[in-house]
Image: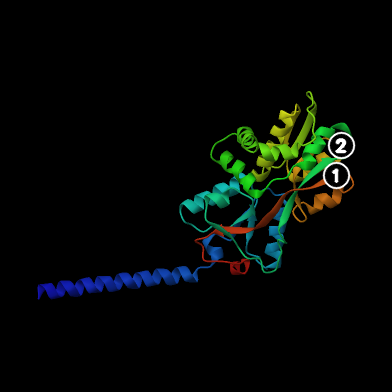
């Protein structure tokens, strides 16, 4: 009899436990995605084209309750890491190439309205007159082209603790054949000064440091100036910067391109196939921006 009552008690406990589990599951399914992240999308620099596109996403998808949090690329990735390590929900503004896609299992939310536009390319932008003043540097910039895989190598080295200059120098040393293509027909100089602007995106830190190493090896004294996107384009347009290799087109930097068109020279794409959008960890059970409603 005692054994029978013990078995009945154990069955009751198991039943109660299963009921509790079912209750938790119901509670979680009833909670919205917005509730789980406090209706916040973690963004980057307030002036970035990605932020403008995300603000338009909030408007076009009628996500009135949502807030786009301004910050920086570093703050965005820190928030992502914190949530990812705890398997918590998080929504961030993202782009590729970016080292976070190699470090975490992530996915883009589908954009059925196409607000973020088609895939973009990164262009090299030079000030007017650069070809006359620094023909060797101009030729290198004009011939500079690499792939997202190339860029990812440099970004990952930096993320893992290498200084940007050291990571770039290592890539240049290990990819002499590609660098030779960029420097074909280029003569060395003796201490000529050139200034490159860049925004503090991991992708642009990588590319700008790589091209700086190449120009330095040719004898240039290269100055790197970190600025926001607006001042970067303004600097090339007014001549205070010689060039940048960070023009995301045709959408992200469209406003700056249109504003200063004629005051700079577009040397064309240096990297093909970038992407912008809202990014979440793969463990989140949402697939589309529509799911945020």
**Where is residue 195, by image quadrant?**
top right
Q: From the viewer's perspective, is 90 left or right of 8?
A: right
Q: Nearer the viewer, residue 180 or 28?
A: 180
Q: From the viewer's perspective, is 29 left or right of 180?
A: left
- Give above or below for 140 relative to 256: above
Q: Which residue is mark 1?
A: 265
Measuring from the top left, give residue 256's x and y in whole percent.
81, 49
Q: Nearer the viewer, residue 128 or 239?
A: 128
Measuring from the top left, give residue 130's x and y in whole percent.
86, 36
Q: Which residue is mark 2?
A: 131
Q: Nearer the viewer, residue 104 or 63?
A: 104
Q: Does label 2 or label 1 sit earlier along the sequence?
A: 2
Question: Helix or strand or loop: what does disc 2 sit on?
Answer: helix
Label 2, residues with CA under 10 Å away: few <14, some 14-19, many ≥20: some
Marks 1 and 2: in contact by CB < 8 Å? yes
Q: Looking at the image, which residue is at 36% across and 69% down?
A: 21
């Amino acid at each position: 009899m005692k054994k029978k009552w013990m078995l009945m008690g154990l069955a009751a406990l198991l039943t109660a436990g299963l009921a509790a589990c079912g209750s938790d599951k119901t509670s979680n399914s009833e909670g919205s995605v917005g509730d789980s992240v406090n209706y916040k999308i973690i963004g980057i620099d307030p002036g970035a084209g990605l932020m403008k596109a995300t603000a338009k996403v909030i408007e076009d998808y009628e996500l009135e309750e949502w807030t786009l949090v301004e910050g920086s690329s570093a703050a965005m990735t820190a928030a992502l890491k914190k949530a990812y390590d705890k398997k918590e929900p998080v929504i961030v503004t993202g782009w590729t190439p970016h080292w976070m896609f190699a470090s975490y299992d992530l996915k883009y939310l589908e954009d059925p309205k196409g607000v973020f536009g088609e895939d973009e390319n990164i262009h090299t932008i030079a000030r007017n007159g650069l070809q006359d003043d620094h023909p060797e540097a101009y030729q290198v910039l004009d011939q500079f082209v690499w792939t997202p895989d190339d860029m990812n190598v440099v970004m990952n080295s930096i993320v893992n603790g290498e200084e940007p200059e050291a990571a770039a120098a290592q890539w240049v040393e290990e990819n002499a054949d590609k660098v030779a293509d960029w420097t074909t027909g280029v003569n060395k100089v003796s201490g000529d000064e050139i200034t490159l602007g860049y925004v503090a995106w991991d992708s642009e830190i990588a590319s700008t440091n790589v091209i700086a190493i190449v120009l330095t090896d040719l004898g240039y004294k290269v100055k790197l100036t970190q600025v926001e996107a607006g001042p970067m384009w303004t600097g090339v347009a007014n001549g205070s910067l010689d060039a940048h290799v960070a023009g995301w087109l045709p959408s992200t930097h469209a406003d700056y391109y249109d504003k200063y068109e004629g005051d700079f020279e577009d040397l064309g794409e240096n990297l093909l196939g970038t992407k912008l959008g809202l990014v979440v960890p793969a463990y989140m059970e949402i697939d589309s921006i529509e799911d945020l409603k």
